[in-house]
Amino acid sequence: MWNNALLIRNTANALIIFSVLAMLYGAAWYVMHLPGLLPLQSVRLSAPPQRVSAAELLRVMRSEVRGNLFTVNIERLRQSFEKLPWVRSVSIRREFPHRLAVQLEEHQAMARWNNSALVNQQGETFVAGSDQALPGFIGQEGTSAEIAQHYARFNQQLVALGLTVEQVALSPRHAWQLRLNNGMVLELGREDMQQRLARFVAVQRTEDRRQMTEDRNTVKYVDLRYRNGFAVRRATNDKG
């Protein structure tokens, strides 16, 4: 092998190139880590946050922003931002020469989840405090997106009656139950929920206005799981 001049020359050239690249990399690393090179001077938010407090954002920035424009750990900073309540996602980019640009996407709450969390417009659950008047979703872990989709459809059907859904419950056996804003409970069962609710709405719309008003004030429970009709339970007037 040592008698092969071409092989020796190619090996030597490769070692020289590798050494030069290693030196350049070391020099670049050293320069980028110089304390006075492109120090970070500001963080720019693309839009003022609606739910996330400025104090929380400032706390994260003071804790995680270290180094200069090149050496700051953007992934760690992003993960720290996303741990804050109401933050759904974050994108961060460097802006030459001294600034980071941060874009926050906040959760938009649409419902409460099992009285312990919230559901956003994408059907995802998250933990945050809120005093908003929100409908309630009750279900097993992993079903929040499905409930959110059906909640929108149920409300679309009920708008003809001037009613809205206050609570959607999905049982472990996948049976659906609605509680409306007038206190009425609708039992939809495990299949054909949209058709059963449509039948209920159609019957209510054919009633005369006086009778419909009386029904809404007295009917507390409607079981729609029958093939050709539904069962009704009215409120009792017992005072004893």
Image: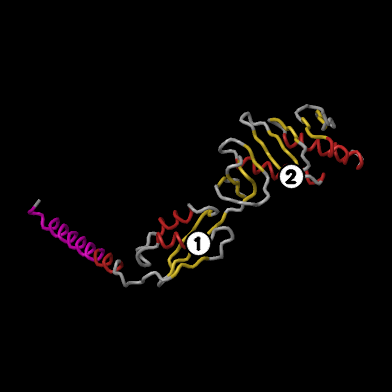
Q: Which residue is mark 1?
A: 55
- Residue most extreme to the left: 3
Is residue 104 shown left or right of residue 134? left
Identify which amino acid the numbered label 2 is placed on. Answer: Asn
Residue drawn at (49%, 63%) of the image: 102
Q: Residues within 10 Å of mark 1 (few under 14, many from 20)?
A: few
**Considering the image in quadrants, where does the C terminus appear?**
top right
Q: Is residue 16 magenta?
A: yes
Residue 179: percent from left, percent from top: 73, 38
Considering the whole magenta stretch, tell me its main secondary structure: helix
Is residue 31 shown left or right of residue 81? left
Q: How many callouts does the rendering have?
A: 2
In the figure, residue 205 lies in which quadrant?
top right
Q: In the image, which is nearer the foreground, mark 1 or mark 2?
A: 1
Residues rendered magenta in the picture: 2-25
In the figure, residue 10 lies in which quadrant?
bottom left
Q: Residues within 10 Å of mark 2 (few under 14, many from 20)?
A: some
Identify which amino acid the numbered label 1 is placed on. Answer: Ala
Label 1 element class = helix
Rendered position, 240 above or below 27: above
